[in-house]
Amino acid sequence: MAREAGRAVARSGMRLVYGGAECGLMGESARAALAEGGSVLGVIPEFLIPVEGAQEGVELRITATMASRKAMMTAEADAFLILPGGAGTLEEVFDMIMQRQHGLHAKPAAFVGTEFWAPLEVLLSQVAKCGFADAGLLDALSFHADPAAALAVLNPQ
């Protein structure tokens, strides 16, 4: 799915903005986008380079902190394509949602992997239903089975 996402982003003419690492699923996405001739921006904190490696062939920006990394990635992104992931992905997702709730951006987000993200979709609906978030906040979030369907929503042409 990660490689498919990278290829789909490149084919759509969009730029892939990601965490800059060589390892992991996003490293796979970046390499797939590059192989497809796509544009890729990697943003990585300096302290992570010895641990995760910095992806070669991408436009690379090095930050001092994780917070500055997320801020730069959010500023550079036009939309958010979210693949299944762990605690880091969840932290970025909730940060993106909070920034949107506070009016710091109005960018859409599409989650890929309907079954994986189903519990989060239910949770976010419950949060809105109970009045802890504006129901309109969820309008900018969509859930899809595959990257192509998600990109069709994020980049309608």
Image (cartoon, rainbow, N blue to C red):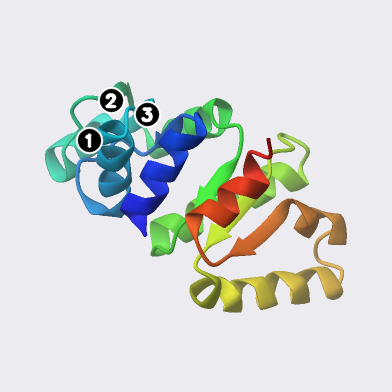
Q: Nearer the viewer, mark 3 or mark 2?
A: 3
Helix, strand or loop for disc 2:
loop
Residue designated by label 2: 58
Q: Quadrant of residue 54?
A: top left
Q: Nearer the viewer, mark 3 or mark 1?
A: 3
Residue 45 place in picture, x, y as percent: 30, 33
Q: Nearer the viewer, mark 1 or mark 2?
A: 2
Among the two numbered marks 1 and 2 on one chain, the one whose residue lies closer to the N terminus: 1
Q: Position of residue 140 (x, y in %)?
A: 74, 51
Question: Badge 2 local density, few (<14 within 10 Å), some, or many (20+)?
Answer: many
- Can see residue 70? no
Q: Residue at x 52, y 77 (%)?
A: 115
Q: Is residue 113 above or below residue 15?
A: below
- Image location (x, y in percent) of residue 4: 37, 52
- Total marks shown come to 3
Q: Which mark is residue 38?
A: 3
Q: Residue furthest left?
A: 50
From where the camera sits, is residue 15 visible? yes
